[in-house]
Image (tube, grey):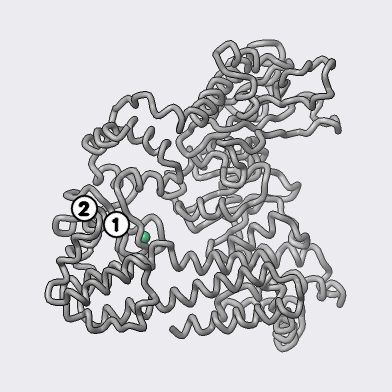
């Protein structure tokens, strides 16, 4: 295993691997670019070919090619290994069976099943009907192939028997989510006691991970779709491979285009995503079987900050969709809503009718606030006092959520004009919206996400490293670090600094105690002309570390708020949170 990792590393250059995702320019012996892992304007992301490593001096992330692929593709080490082995043209030897076998066998089961379903589509009489259904919906042969669409025959054990014939145990098939274990008392029915196939008589949409490996399935009825007792869609339940809260359907095909176009179009259905890609809108993904989750947003954030939603959304409802959108909004995503015209057609239907219409919808997408205004004013009568009240109830919290005061005042003005009431009245009403409703749990989560976001995990470590590297350049800087600062450091840095103070005549002697990777990081940091050395820089680092302390306290505080059930105590905690948050901006 280790030797294969080394072999892959020897065949692939960090410059080529990283360069496939990030635009790099040469600076001295190193290369620099805009970090793909945090949002920044100036490039603080460096690649060192001589050390075969990358490092961002903005967010602190760094490592070798494996770390990079894991991070940027959002995958685990095993998958990164497979991906890079493939790129290097190396066939992986049998991996440690204990570690990988279960996951690997589930991948195999999913892939085999996918091929099985693909073969059935168009094969039997029903399979033909299934295919005709897809073609009629406008999905062409190329798309059927690309998305590996299939048909699951209407039998209880067809797939299971096929997989057992290939050497897989029935319980593994259950674990992959493809078969269902009947409750023990159900024996004697036509299903028998054996697990039975989960998907029967349905059109199959395989669900891929970011490497286009099949990890689950969505299945749709296409005959008697109106029968009430059958669910139109069913999906693979949570398995070792599949978790709907972090899967965006089609992102494997869309990720490059999303980055390139710096926008991600979100739809609700599998067919929407497929039809959009077919029509050339290849930056489209579908959120399927669930609302937008914080994990989805974290994944999307890696690719683009701009979301274009084509959901059917009820502005007045307190729906999961709306919560997801609020969440995205307060995480700093720029959100637009596609203009799906009357009849509430979905993107697939619009494209089937005329792809040009969808292009128009995307072009005419409205900013989220515009959308709130348009749909709320369409829903209530603005002349009626009751209607005015209802409109305010929906729009004011959205305005209150805006972080920017100028933007806020713009919408206050607009609301007062449209309602025909004074701005003072709108402002008074805005003020009266309790902070509590703004700090609902969802938003509190967001504040935490925000705090963490400004503050990627590696930032603290990076600041500590920076201080160490500045001391290494000029041992005189050591005097600037006072005893009271030591509490900002992790134990390791604290020891290092204390040791350096003891050996102040030769602080570099202390370096013998740290690992090669760390030394590489510190040397690269000292090498690139990224920072001013000197007292100011150290002071800046120290004050930023203090800031981090404060943020950590805020995170703890917000956790207590969520756990507190007593209304009054909760409000006190929220007050404390707000005060501390203000302090933060003064640091
Ligand atoms: Zn970064």
Image location of residue 498, percent across then percent down:
27, 74
The reply to whether residue 398 is visible in this rendering is: no
Q: Which secondary structure, mark 2? A: strand
Write the residue at 79% across / 27% down.
Answer: 183
Residue beneath label 1, please? Answer: 55
> Seen in the image, is 119 located left or right of residue 567?
left
Look at the numbered disc 2 and say if its residue's Cβ is closer than 8 Å to ligand 1.
Answer: no
Ligand 1 in which quarter: bottom left
Residue beneath label 2, please? Answer: 48
Q: Residues within 10 Å of mark 1 (few under 14, many from 20)?
A: many
Write the residue at 62% across / 15% down.
Answer: 120
> Seen in the image, is 286 located left or right of residue 305?
right
User: Can you tell which quarter of the image residue 250 is in?
Assistant: top right
User: Can you tell which quarter of the image residue 329 is in?
Assistant: bottom right
> Seen in the image, is 448 located left or right of residue 127?
left
Q: Are marks 2 and 1 in contact (CB under 8 Å)?
A: yes
Write the residue at 67% across / 16% down.
Answer: 127
Seen from this angle, which residue lies furthest bottom?
A: 424
Q: Residues within 10 Å of mark 2 (few under 14, many from 20)?
A: some
Image location of residue 145, percent across then percent down:
53, 24
Q: Nearer the viewer, residue 550 or 21?
A: 550
Image location of residue 4, percent across then percent down:
29, 32
Could you tell me which quadrant the C terminus lies in? bottom left
């Amino acid at each position: 295993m280790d030797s294969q990792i080394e072999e892959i590393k020897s065949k692939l250059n960090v410059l080529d691997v990283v360069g496939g995702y990030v635009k790099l320019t040469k600076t001295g012996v190193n290369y620099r670019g805009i970090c793909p892992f945090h949002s920044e304007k100036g490039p603080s992301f460096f690649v060192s070919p001589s050390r075969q490593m990358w490092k961002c001096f903005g967010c602190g992330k760094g490592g070798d090619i494996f770390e990079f692929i894991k991070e940027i593709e959002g995958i685990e080490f095993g998958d990164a290994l497979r991906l890079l082995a493939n790129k290097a043209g190396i066939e992986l030897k049998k991996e440690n069976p204990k570690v990988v076998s279960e996951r690997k066998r589930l991948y195999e089961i999913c892939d085999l099943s996918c091929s099985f379903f693909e073969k059935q589509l168009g094969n039997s009489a029903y399979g033909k009907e299934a295919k005709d259904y897809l073609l009629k919906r406008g999905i062409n042969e190329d798309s059927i192939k690309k998305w590996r669409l299939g048909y699951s025959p209407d039998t209880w054990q067809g797939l299971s028997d096929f997989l057992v014939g290939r050497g897989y145990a029935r319980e593994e098939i259950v674990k992959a989510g493809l078969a269902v274990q009947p409750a023990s008392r159900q024996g004697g029915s036509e299903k028998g006691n054996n697990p039975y196939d989960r998907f029967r008589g349905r059109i199959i949409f395989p669900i891929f991970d970011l490497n286009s490996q099949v990890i689950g399935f969505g299945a749709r009825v296409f005959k008697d779709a109106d029968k009430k007792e059958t669910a139109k869609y069913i999906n693979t339940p949570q398995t070792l491979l599949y978790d709907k809260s972090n899967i965006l359907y089609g992102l494997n095909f869309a990720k490059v285009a999303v980055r390139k176009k710096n926008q991600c179009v979100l739809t609700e259905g599998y067919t929407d995503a497929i039809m959009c890609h077919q029509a050339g809108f290849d930056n489209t993904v579908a959120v399927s079987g669930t609302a937008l989750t914080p994990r989805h947003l974290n994944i999307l954030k890696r690719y683009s900050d701009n979301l274009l939603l084509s959901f059917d959304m009820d502005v007045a409802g307190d729906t999961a969709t709306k919560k997801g959108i609020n969440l995205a909004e307060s995480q700093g995503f720029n959100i637009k809503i596609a203009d799906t015209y009357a009849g509430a057609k979905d993107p697939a239907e619009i494209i089937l009718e005329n792809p040009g219409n969808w292009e128009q919808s995307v072009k005419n997408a409205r900013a989220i606030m515009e959308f709130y205004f348009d749909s709320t004013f369409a829903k209530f009568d603005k002349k009626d006092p009751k209607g005015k009240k209802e409109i305010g109830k929906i729009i004011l919290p959205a305005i209150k959520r805006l972080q920017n005061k100028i933007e806020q005042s713009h919408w206050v003005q607009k609301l007062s004009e449209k309602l025909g009431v004074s701005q003072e009245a709108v402002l008074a009403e805005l003020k009266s919206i309790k902070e509590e409703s703004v700090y609902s749990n969802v938003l509190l989560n967001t504040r935490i996400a925000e705090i963490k976001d400004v503050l990627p995990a590696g930032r603290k470590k990076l600041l500590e490293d920076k201080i160490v590297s500045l001391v290494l350049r000029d041992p005189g800087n050591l005097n600037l670090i006072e005893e009271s600062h030591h509490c900002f450091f992790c134990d390791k840095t604290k020891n290092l600094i204390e040791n350096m103070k003891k050996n102040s005549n030769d602080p570099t002697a202390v370096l013998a105690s740290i690992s090669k990777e760390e030394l590489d990081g510190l040397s690269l940091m000292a090498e690139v002309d990224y920072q001013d050395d000197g007292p100011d820089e150290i002071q800046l680092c120290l004050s930023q570390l203090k800031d981090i302390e404060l943020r950590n306290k805020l995170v703890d505080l917000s956790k207590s708020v969520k756990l507190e059930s007593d209304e009054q105590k909760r409000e006190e905690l929220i007050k404390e949170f707000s005060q501390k948050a203000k302090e933060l901006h003064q640091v």
